[in-house]
Amino acid sequence: MEPKIIPVIICGGAGTRLWPESREAFPKPLLKLADGESLLQKTLKRAARFVQDGEVIIVTSRETYFLTKDECAGTAIDIRPQLGFVLEPMGRNTAAAIGVAAEAIRGRHGEHAVMLVLPADQLIDDEGAFAEAVTHAVAAAQQGRLVTFGIRPTSPETGYGYIEYDEAQAMDSHVRRVSRFVEKPVLEQAKSLVADGRHLWNAGMFCFTANTLLDELERHAPSVYGPVIDASREATMSTADDSFMLELNSDHFSRAENISIDYALMERSSNVDVVPCELGWSDIGSWLAISELTKADERGNRLDGRVELYDSENCFVRGGDRLVGLVGLRDVIVVDTADALLVAASDRSQDVKHIVAKLKRSNDDTFRLHRTVHRPWGTYTVLEEGDHFKMKRIVVKPGASLSLQMHHHRSEHWIVVRGCAEIVNGDHSTLLQPNESTYIPAGHKHRLGNPGVVDLVLIEVQCGEYLGEDDIVRFADAYGRVPS
């Protein structure tokens, strides 16, 4: 009997080393690569190859759920599995994320279902070699083992953790017993690890049965296991034709220890195997790694977007709508977005995270949001703002609507540019066409909806003493954002 494999995609993390494109509310897996596909879409396609009529579980945050779901819906897949979304109310690292997925799988598919855990932010070039590695991992998982995947190193990388395996102990020629895990080493240690032939890069991918994972968590990490079980058993479940959503209980989940699966379980258990493999693997952990996905020109420059260079070499430039020009530069990384520009030395690409840390400490929203912000109903883009005013471009998807809401401190003026707007303004409802407008005084209940089949586009002008996004009182909402 063929084992039942349930892929689990862990889709979270701020991706601080890929700022300014990756933000807290727009995490690294949603980043589009040069071919137009996101890392999440590539991971979903990879996962779907292991299920015929089953499902794929995606663990993500409540805040990014609708954006993640839209990204999955836009993935080109021949056989589309049912998707299950497990929503974390707050981040608690990978041990809790994998634990809640295991409990969901055990309840839906039984304790012997095999979990294939995949981070949503990695690339694998050799899909055939990956499928073969999964076959070996599944066989070991069915024997009650915790299985991880180790990449044969091609260079002494200091940005990866390493796995040391025991050559003398093996389930078979493809699966080795893990001796120990090694933290990210300094360069000299990394050179020694690569040279001895018994160390592999830790890929952060795993395979085990749901029951094995939960039993081991209970034994080695009760500070994760207990809250995970409680949060799962008191979760809220909702279903649709093509997916289901499990929203975890916030009070219980907040008690889970914030710890990775490596620290919580893999380094503590004696029940761990590794499948050594060569997959053309990359964790896309920096802009230098992103740059290597773009073909270099005759001077070593790698360009993505509208770029003009003069007397520049070995540079990576990723532009947006604006033209980017470089003159006389060597070995630099330039990433241009609508509201932030990164310029970094190529050999310092790992240090971008320090910029994000400074932004977070100063409460600068640039660490969290793009100028264009995604919402369940569409997007808004801040066009200009100043003392007591803000201008936005709002796009509402067909059939979608904003919440019925009210603002204490600001009034709003809406001008329809494209499509048809269905507007509730106090006690009145109306339809507005392009070049028509309405005024929403402060304190008025109002709602904006799109009853049409094309995107609704409008310009919003806000005026008031306070224009923060937290000045919203919601009375009704189609996306569950009204506090109970």
Image (cartoon, rainbow, N blue to C red):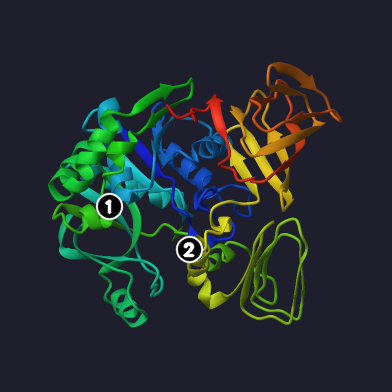
User: For the residue marked with disc 2, what is the amino acid?
Assistant: Arg
Callout 2: SS: helix
274 lies above or below 30: below
- Can you see residue 3? no
Give the left or right position of residue 235, taking residue 463 as reference: left
Q: Are marks 1 and 2 in contact (CB under 8 Å)?
A: no
**Is the C terminus in the top left, top right, bottom left or bottom right quadrant?**
top left
Tell me which residue sits at (75%, 55%) in the image.
321
346 relative to 461 in the view: left or right:
left
Q: Which mark is residue 261?
A: 1
Q: Residue furthest right?
A: 435
Closer-to-camera residue (483/357): 483
Of labels 1 and 2, the one closer to you: 2
Identified at 30% across, 40% down, the residue is: 253
The N terminus: image quadrant: top left
The secondary element bearing badge 1 is classed as helix
How many neighbours does mark 1 have within 10 angstroms: few (below 14), some (14-19), or many (20 or more)? many
Q: Amino acid at mark 1?
A: Ile
Q: Which mark is residue 361?
A: 2
Residue 395: x, y in percent?
70, 36
The image quadrant of residue 165 is bottom left
Sequence-first disc among 1 and 2: 1
